[in-house]
Amino acid sequence: MSVRRKLIDVNNSPDPQKPLKNQKALVTGANSGIGEACALAFGAAGADVVINYVSRPEEAERVVKSIRQNGTRAIAFQADVSQEDQVQAMFAEMQKEFGTIDILVNNAGLQRDSRFQDMTLEQWNTVIAINLTGQFLCARAAVREFLRRGVVPEVSTAAGKIICMSSVHEVIPWSGHVNYAASKGGVMQLMKSMAQELAPKKIRVNGIAPGAIKTPINRAAWATPADEAKLLELIPEGRVGVPDDIARAAVWLASDASDYVTGTTLFVDGGMTLYPGFATGG
Ligand code: BGC
């Protein structure tokens, strides 16, 4: 079936609410925040989902339960994405349970903030290991399976889709967070270089760059009304984002509706990257 034919099928699908029907997705760091929202949205869009987590298994189980209630399959799997053996074990389990993988959301990430002169090597290494090396290890495992299996036209026009969760800080420098900004700049080039290399194999790789989204990672930035007001000075749309803002973008990038999109970062940031200081200055 040609790509064009398949797109027409998608648009005329009897079930347009389920653009990820019969697809198998793995979302890393899926027991809270943006990862949880993506996992729930993928389940609602018809996908079976592996919920990766590293701590707090009860939260992973809550996400699993909620997806199952919607009628698709879900399992939780504990793995530190920076550890090669744990990533391999997770993909082996997914293969055993679901038979393959169609969509990877490289979402697991963290911050270890510090003034530059005080930043320890451990703070640097932890952030690079989880945010960047973790994305490499999971993407490599997913790509090996995409290449082995190839395109299955009834499932998707692509052999596989990878979504790299980046940040506005892939382009906005961030004082006090150089390890984090460096990791996200790295994610951008990891994503683009993979996209260039793998496009001929019908594997699409894209990034999402969230701005300030209300999740545990940045609670201090919006915890009090005064904090939130200060944060809003950086957001032209005048609201802090919510995880569903990102999940909706992720469903689109994972679906055949974005068949011709690869190697791009979709900024979902309420305008944070629009140099808000220049709205009144310059
Ligand atoms: C960071 C948040 C921050 C946001 C906007 C995100 O990538 O994880 O802590 O609020 O960027 O600066």
Image (spheres, grey):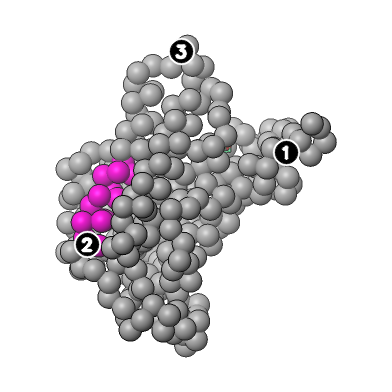
On the image, the x and y values in percent for residue 27 come to 36, 55
Mark 2 = which residue? 147
Q: Quadrant of ligand 1?
A: top right
Amino acid beneath label 3: Asp
Task: Tell me the magenta residue range.
Answer: 134-147
Checking the image for residue 276, the label placed there is 1
* Crowd rating for badge 2 (residues with CA inside 10 Å; few <14, some 14–19, many 20+): some
Other residues around mark 1 within 10 Å, as few (<14) / some (14–19) / many (≥20): some
Instruction: State the CA–CA distance, disc 2 to disc 3.
Output: 44 Å
Lower position in the chain sequence, tag 2 or tag 1: 2
User: Magenta stretch containing residue 177, yes or no?
Assistant: no
Q: Quadrant of residue 119?
A: top left
Assign a secondary structure to mark 1: helix
**Rendered position, 166 above or below 144:** above
> Which residue of the protein is positioned furthest toward the right in this rendering?
280
Choose the circle earlier in sequence order: 1 or 3. 3
Q: Amino acid at mark 2?
A: Leu
- Quadrant hosting residue 206: bottom left
Residue 61 has which mark? none
Point 79% across, 31% down: residue = 282
* Of labels 2 and 3, the one closer to you: 2
